Amino acid sequence: MSATAFDPAAAARAWRPPALIGDARLRWAIYAGALLYAALALGSVEVNWTRAAEGLERGARFLAGFFPPDFVSKREEILDGLLESLTMTVVATALGIVLSVPVALGAARNLAPLPVYLFCRGIIAVSRTFQEIIIAIVFVAMLGFGPLAGMLTLAFATIGFLGKLLAEDIEDMQAEQAEAIRATGAGWFQLLAWAVLPQVRPRLIGLSAYRLDINFRESAVLGLVGAGGIGDTLNTAFDRYEFDTAAAVLIVIVAIVLACEYTSGWIRRAVQ
Amino acid sequence: MPGDAALLSVEGLSKRYPTGDLALDDVDLQVPAGQVMALIGPSGAGKSTLIRCVNRLVEPSAGRVRLEGEEITGLGATALRRARRRMGMIFQEYALVERLTVMENVLSGRLGYTGFWASWFRRFPRRDVEQAFRLLDRVGLAHMADKRADALSGGQRQRVGILRALMQDPALLLVDEPTASLDPRTSRQIMRLLVELCEERGLAAIINIHDVALARDFARRIVGLRAGRIVFDGPPEALDAEVLTRIYGEEDWSRALRRPEEEDAEEAATAA
């Protein structure tokens, strides 16, 4: 028998399931390092227990100020803020979708030539880099306080969100279907309408509904930097120490966010 | 060009992919009007590349392609789209737009003749829709017109794929492995339908197929491609072990060369 004869029994004994990190020394070094880091990090946390105890009491008083929530005495302001937020959200989402579709087409490598691709990916990267609050501060500085700044902020953020996710869906589409439509002699726009759109439509609708939901939540935050909407109402209530009104505003926001989330979830399921 | 009897004429066609692979190496091929030709060869021989170079879904690296005397290579985008209308393409995985209905898929064969907005609103001329229904009825799918394409079986989908190509009013069919995803019986039915339709309408066809028995039974001319070069061109009767070895390489071909009469008999028995 030659030295190269294969012995399945010995091979089976020697076989081990593959480890996540192949090198045993490296594996143990990583585990030990992680443990050491956790111990050091915990040791470095300074907790002032007396300050925390005082804070708890203050927090309790603060929370107690919320009850009972007062929907009535500032009803007008709450309603105005709410309406402004909803308007901002709907307009920003619609504008954002209209702007993000061409960006998404340009950011899909299977449709766009390289320069267009890089340009559109650049727009998406810029939009996604800056948190809404930062963009809102810039727009407020440029355009003054009010919902216009908030609306533009949300529209801009929508481009990054929808543009990126839609572009990924376009890149994942089945190339054969597009090839077949091109082979019929269809033009570029017909290719989009007949091969690309049918494949990405469910995702486009689902993402739009989801973004509407996100935009409303964001609109509540944007008021804090003066970009209008229900956040403004909330901010004013806090500034005036009207915690009962603030509680009412918070409840309204929670209710609307829940309603939006439920609706967008239902829409996404319906179009799948 | 007067005196040029060939419907399609390919001269010195080469294709080198950016990866460096030479898929086609100086191919010359003439297809007269109305001829059903089978293109056989091992996987990777360049069969798909060849038919895609004819309608320029793949851009050839060198050589000329002429259809009905018009040089396809070198056409601008608009003229190329017009030329593509005369070349119907049929795909291995059917390449139907799955979320569109059967009728929409059949009508998409008319995109090259229809303006963008008319196609966007599905306003096709009445006679196109009538023609689509006539064809659907011919293949027994008229009752499925409003079903979504992904609700169909493989054989039904390929019939729709064939009708889409016929709607283009083509002179030539480019057929890429039409039976590779189908069971043997459906494969023969699809091949029979293709050949029948070509005869009725005087269409020429290039059928890429790796099933030698099917090629021999349904085509009047066989062209063998190996490593991007034509190594055989002749009638089906001339296919013997020597030729198959030249196309595919060394193998015991005696069993593959049996006539598949048994299969036909079986099919007749099932149909009866």
Image (cartoon, coloured by chain):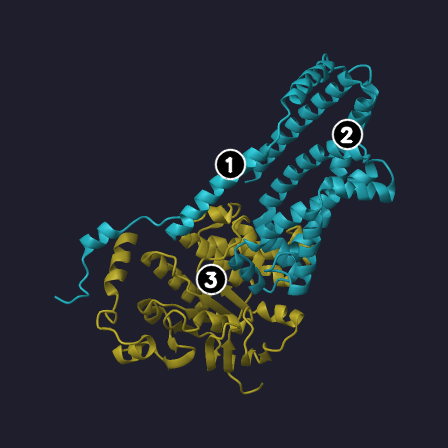
Residue matched to label 2: A231
Left-right relation of A221 to A74: left
Residue kind at label 3, given as amino acid type: Phe
Left-right relation of B154 to A51: left
Residue matched to label 1: A39
Dot in front, 3 or 2: 2
Tell me the chain of label 3. B
For this rendering, which residue is in front, B159 or A87?
Answer: A87
**Mark 3 to mark 2 CA distance (whole Å):** 56 Å
Quadrant in which residue A66 is drawn = top right
**Mark 2 to mark 1 CA distance (whole Å):** 41 Å
Dot in front, 2 or 1: 1
Residue drawn at x 74%, y 36% is A89
- Crowd class of label 1 (few under 14; some 14 to 19; many from 20; radius 10 Å): few
| Image vertical order of residue A20 relative to residue A256, above or below | below
Co-location on one chain, circles 3 and 1: no
- Crowd class of label 2 (few under 14; some 14 to 19; many from 20; radius 10 Å): many
For this rendering, which residue is in front, B79 or B44?
Answer: B44
Residue kind at label 1, given as amino acid type: Ala
Q: Secondary structure at mark 1?
A: helix
| Image vertical order of residue B220 relative to residue A118, above or below | below
Residue matched to label 3: B91
Dot in front, 3 or 1: 1
For this rendering, which residue is in front, B206 or B68?
Answer: B206
Percent position (x, y) of residue B149?
Answer: 50, 49
Residue drawn at x 62%, y 52% is A167
Mark sitting earlier along the chain (2/1): 1
Tell me the chain of label 2. A
Quadrant in which residue B262 is drawn = bottom left
| Image vertical order of residue A217 relative to residue A143, above or below | above
Colour of chain B in the image: yellow
Colour of chain A in the image: cyan
